[in-house]
């Protein structure tokens, strides 16, 4: 049991408010435990806090205010407080901001009580309306999860009377139930899919790690379609047998529906979920049941890392290389790296699963820090697709078109055979640039230094930085010329338009995040395609992540060179990962697949590595180049972003920091910049970037903290520190 503080004892409380220290309060009536979640007075308000330890004192104790109440939930465990402290120290994030990540739960202070919830029943309505259809669709999408009346009406966009009408016909069930019921028991001994070959050995190794009840990280590398999911679900099963809790992180909410179905089949019940698509009612239930140990398995997004597990034994990071695990606003952290930290504190195992691992994980496995397991064969009868380059320098391509004659022929042959083809272009919208042919001006966002992207299907221009939208103008806003606005370059919508002209008889489906208003709509589109509802699929990187299309036998990559341009040190790695992932969509069943890559640089080392399939050679070459340059993972980096509403203030602050670089030089680090960020203005804020670079062994966080603390920056200036930056925009 944690330490107990009797009523009136002076205790230190950490709040989630922007205050740099704990605050002293008296323990409430009935006392409280170390780690208790409490409500405390702060000025005229009452705020959430956590009892962090004994009070510090040093003031007139008669003036100490009392904790208003301690919440009826298990106290924050010591391992969570240690994790938050270490994660904050690593990312240079103050504790109040870290605590906010761990207390993002609605109604934490609500006492246990009864409530009315609504689920899908078995009956059919006497008649269907659009409103009723939306209610039923929402309930089906969430697989039996409970809604309050308000949540269901908001999610479906209907009035409460529509739901009550369905209740009267038993189409929707209204139940009185205690809040926060435990999740159904998951049975780890139900049979999973039969394993074969390397899967058996890999699963046995993971089970052995779970039984050790200690920390360890394993890189589970398996080619696309090799059965990585079945293997790590065996590790989940062993964790549940040991009576411990498990967590699986996914990079995209869109992937969760298919994955949850697989989990339900494997363990006989649906696990807890934690992501932005979960209702507030279910978020509260999930948080509390995790804290009490009555949720065995959680499937979630990166923020699930901060849930209050009672006995965490396993964390799986699926598609561990995915860039969406990096939080790019607020608290800047990489969930993959923080997973390893959390597991080391909790004595848990980590499985990093990917067909194309991040270079950081590959290097850690090479160095022996991580165990490595390889799955080199596709599951069942499926074989890897044949990969070939289409040299665009020899293709006769008309102006304003992007599907080469060679690729057209290959697509036509597959469609005529009753199979599916995928045309891949990692660019949303219709065209990345809209230009006036009369004055030469490009249409740009009024809030950002970014071009507006035409989304013709929505008849809108959209800024992909701040989300600003506006109608497509009929005349140039700069010179007033009529009919002179031209779309430059391709996006998936323009590719769809071209495909409709080239293949007029084919059924074409476009998969892009912009085109779906909800996860439900995307799920339905994916299911339609998987059952043969389209001949040609046109998509962005959304299609590269985990979807299984049994009839898909051809992948055509429209612009394989797109990711090779620019100064991003990870450009080669990202391109390699994305091309291998998207090519892996082909030939997933008993039909052999083919991947064709349109490129103007077939001799480029990355293109050659993708085509040859020699991944080890690529990683070795990429690691050698990074090591020679002293770049991560062989060196340390920190990004500094200075933002101001007044142009020039951010640059002036950057120059002041550059002149005061003594603490960095003393530690062996160097600072580069300041320089305008590649996107110099976002949402009206002018941005300047600096980069700190240091050898591997330098205590970078301490040096950066001392450096920044030594400069008085003007009020109204935002300074953000990004340890281990992934992007440089």
Image (cartoon, rainbow, N blue to C red):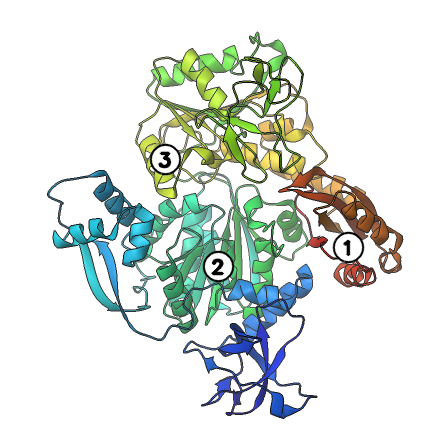
- Image location (x, y in percent) of residue 466: 57, 40
Q: Which residue is mark 3?
A: 526
- Image location (x, y in percent) of residue 313: 48, 66
Q: Which mark is residue 696?
A: 1
Of residues 301 and 121, which is closer to you in this image?
A: 121
Q: Which residue is mark 2?
A: 304
In 3D space, how far apart are the residues under numbered discs 3 and 2 (Cα atoms)? 25 Å
Left or right? Give the position of 459 relative to 20: left
Where, by quadrant of the figure, is residue 570 drawn? top right
Residue at x 59%, y 59% (from the top left corner): 338
Taking 719 as reference, is 73 above or below it?
below
Q: Quadrant of the C terminus?
A: top right
In this orientation, does residue 424 appear? no
Taking 138 as reference, is 535 above or below it?
above
User: Mark 1 and 3 residues: CB-CB less than 8 Å, in contact?
Assistant: no
- Crowding around mark 1 (Cα neighbors within 10 Å: few <14, some 14 to 19, many 20+) is some
Of mark 3 and mark 2, the one earlier in the sequence is: 2
Residue at x 71%, y 54% (from the top left corner): 716
Q: Secondary structure at mark 2?
A: helix
Where, by quadrant of the figure, is residue 699 drawn? bottom right
In 3D space, how far apart are the residues under numbered discs 2 and 1 (Cα atoms)? 30 Å
């Amino acid at each position: 049991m944690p330490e107990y503080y009797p009523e009136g004892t002076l205790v230190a409380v950490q709040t989630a408010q922007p205050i740099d220290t704990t605050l002293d309060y008296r323990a409430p009536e009935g006392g409280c435990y170390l780690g208790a979640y409490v409500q405390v007075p702060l000025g005229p308000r009452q705020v959430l806090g956590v009892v962090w330890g004994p009070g510090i004192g040093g003031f007139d104790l008669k003036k100490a205010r009392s904790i208003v109440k301690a919440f009826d939930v298990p106290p924050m465990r010591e391992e969570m407080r240690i994790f938050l402290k270490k994660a904050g120290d690593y990312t240079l994030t103050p504790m109040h901001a870290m605590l906010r990540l761990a207390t993002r739960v609605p109604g934490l202070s609500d006492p246990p009580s009864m409530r009315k919830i609504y689920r899908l029943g078995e009956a059919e309505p006497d008649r269907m309306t659009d409103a009723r259809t939306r209610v039923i669709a929402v309930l089906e999408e969430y697989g039996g999860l409970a809604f309050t009346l308000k949540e269901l009406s908001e999610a479906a966009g209907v009035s409460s009377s529509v739901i009550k009408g369905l209740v009267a016909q038993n189409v929707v069930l209204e139940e009185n139930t205690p809040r926060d019921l435990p999740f159904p028991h998951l049975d780890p001994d139900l049979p999973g899919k039969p394993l074969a070959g390397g899967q058996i050995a890999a699963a046995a190794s993971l089970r052995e790690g779970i039984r050790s009840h200690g920390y360890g990280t394993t890189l589970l590398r398996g080619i696309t379609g090799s059965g990585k999911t079945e293997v790590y679900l065996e590790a989940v099963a062993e964790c549940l047998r040991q009576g411990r809790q498990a967590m699986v992180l996914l990079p995209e909410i869109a992937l969760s529906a298919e994955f949850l179905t697989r989990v339900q089949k494997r363990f006989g019940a649906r696990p807890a979920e934690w992501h932005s698509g979960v209702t507030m009612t279910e978020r509260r239930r999930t948080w509390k049941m995790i804290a009490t140990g009555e949720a065995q398995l959680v499937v979630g997004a990166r923020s699930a890392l901060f849930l209050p597990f009672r006995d965490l034994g396993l964390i799986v990071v699926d598609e561990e290389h995915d860039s969406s695990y990096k939080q790019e606003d607020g608290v800047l952290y990489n969930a993959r790296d923080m997973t390893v930290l959390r597991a080391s504190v909790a004595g848990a195992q980590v499985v990093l699963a990917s067909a194309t691992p991040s270079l950081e994980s590959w290097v850690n496995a090479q160095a022996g820090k991580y165990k490595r397991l390889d799955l080199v064969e596709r599951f069942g009868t499926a074989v890897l697709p044949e990969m070939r380059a289409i040299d665009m320098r020899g293709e006769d391509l008309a102006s304003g078109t992007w599907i080469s004659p060679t690729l057209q022929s290959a697509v036509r042959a597959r469609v005529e055979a009753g199979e599916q083809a995928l045309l891949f272009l990692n660019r949303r919208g219709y065209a990345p640039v809209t230009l006036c042919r009369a004055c030469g001006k490009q249409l740009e966002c009024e809030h950002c230094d970014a071009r507006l992207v035409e989304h013709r299907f929505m008849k809108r221009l959209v800024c992909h930085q701040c989300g600003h939208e506006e109608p497509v103008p009929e005349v140039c806003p700069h010179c007033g010329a009529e009919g002179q606005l031209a779309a430059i370059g391709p996006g998936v919508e323009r590719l769809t338009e071209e495909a409709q002209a080239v293949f007029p008889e084919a059924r074409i489906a476009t998969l892009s995040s912009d085109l779906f208003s909800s996860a439900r709509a995307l799920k339905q589109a994916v299911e339609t395609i998987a059952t043969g509802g389209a001949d040609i699929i046109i998509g962005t990187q959304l299609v590269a992540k985990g979807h299984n299309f049994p009839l898909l036998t051809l992948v055509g990559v429209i612009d394989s060179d797109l990711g090779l341009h620019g100064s991003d040190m990870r450009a080669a790695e990202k391109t390699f990962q994305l091309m291998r992932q998207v090519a892996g969509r082909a030939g997933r069943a008993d039909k052999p697949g083919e991947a064709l890559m349109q490129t103007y640089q077939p001799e480029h080392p990355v293109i050659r590595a993708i085509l040859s399939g020699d991944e080890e050679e690529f990683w070795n070459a990429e690691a050698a180049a990074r090591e020679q340059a002293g770049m991560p993972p062989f060196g340390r980096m920190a990004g500094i972003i200075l933002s101001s509403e007044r142009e020039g203030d951010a640059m002036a602050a950057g120059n002041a920091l550059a002149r005061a670089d003594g603490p960095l030089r003393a530690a062996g680090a160097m600072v580069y910049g300041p320089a305008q960020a590649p996107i110099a203005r976002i949402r009206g804020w002018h941005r300047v970037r600096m980069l700190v670079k240091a050898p591997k062994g330098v205590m970078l966080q301490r040096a950066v903290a001392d450096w920044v603390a030594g400069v008085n920056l003007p009020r109204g200036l935002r300074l953000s520190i990004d340890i281990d930056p992934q992007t440089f925009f």
